[in-house]
Amino acid sequence: MQRTKVEYGTAPSQFGHVYLPADGIGPTDVVRPVVLIHGGYWSTEFALTIETAIARLIAGRGCVVWNIEYRRVGEDGGGWPGTGRDVLAALRALDGPVRDAIPGEIAAQVDWDAVAVVGHSAGGQLAVWAVAQLGAHTAGTTITQVIAQSAALDLEAGADRPSIRGLMGRPADEIPHRYREASPVCQEPFDAHVVALHGELDTAIPVEASRRYVQTVTAAGQSAELVVVPGEGHDAFVDPRSASTRRTIRLLGV
C-alpha cells in the first residue's frame, strides 16, 4: 500500500501520511477522502502511528486517507490553541499539499464534497472543534461527516482531568472562556453530521458524556446522533479487528 508523508507546516510534527486505495480503483468508482485524528491525551506519548492500522484498513476499502500529526503538549507550540490551529491547518491542507500527493488518475475520482473526519478520544475533540471553526468547509472541500469516537466533547465538565488541564495550560477558573472556546459542546451548529460513537464499556470517558453532548447540541440545531457499540471500551477504536472499527467503517459507508 502506498503511503506518502506530506508536510502542512514547518514544525517537526506538522505533517501527516496520505494513504491511497490499496488495490487501485475502477474507472467509475467514487473515492471518499477520510481524515484521521489520533488521540492520546494531546500528549507526545502518543503519535499518528496508533492510527496506522486503521488508516490502512480504510484505504483498503477504496478511500484516500489523510492521517495527521499535530503539535502536542510538551512540544514547542503545542497545547492550546496551537494544537487546535495545527488541526485547522491540516484540514486546509486538503486543498493543496494533500491533493498534490494524489496521482491524477485517482484525484479525478475523489469526491471532495464528501470529506469525513474521524477523531478518537482527544482527537475527537480536535475533530469536532476544527470542523466547527471551518463551518465544515475549506476553500475546496466540504466536510459532511464527523465521527467522534469516545471523544472528549465537554472540556468544562472535564476540567479537573490532568490531561485537559495540561492541554489548556491553566485551571478552568482562571481562563473559563478558553475552556468554552475549545469545547465541542459549546460550538455553534455547522453543516456536517456528527456521530458520537462510543463504546458501552468505556471507563476512560463514559458513554454518558457523548449522550449529553448529543442532547445539548441537537437542541441547539446541530445534526448529531449517538451510536453505542455494545461490549467494547475506549481503546477498541484503534483495533482494526474490533466491532467499534467495523461500526466506523459502516458509518463511513465504505
Image: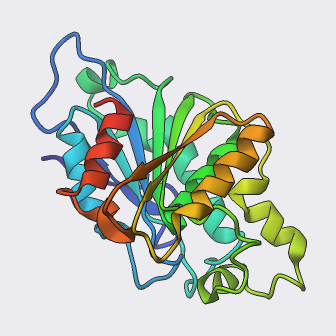
* Residue name at image x 23 percent, y 41 percent: 59
- For residue 28, side relative to residue 154 (left or right): left
- For residue 140, side relative to residue 236 (left or right): right
Residue 78 coordinates in the image, percent (x, y):
61, 77
Q: Total of numbered circles in the picture?
A: 0
Judge whether 1 appears above or below 79 on screen.
Answer: above
- For residue 58, side relative to residue 114 (left or right): left
Q: Image quadrant of residue 225?
A: top right
Residue 15 coordinates in the image, percent (x, y):
43, 61
Residue that sits furthest to the top in the current view:
28
Residue 69 coordinates in the image, percent (x, y):
44, 64
State whether residue 67 appears in this view.
yes
Judge whether 57 appears above or below 81 on screen.
Answer: above
**Nearest the camera: 123 or 186?**
186
Q: Image quadrant of residue 52?
A: bottom left
State whether residue 133 appears in this view.
no
Judge whether 159 appears above or below 146 on screen.
Answer: below
Residue that sits furthest to the left in the current view:
23
How are the residues colored? rainbow
* Residue name at image x 9 percent, y 33 percent: 23
**Nearest the camera: 157 or 69?**
157
Q: Image quadrant of residue 100?
A: top left
Quadrant of image for the C terminus: top left
* Residue name at image x 54 percent, y 77 percent: 72
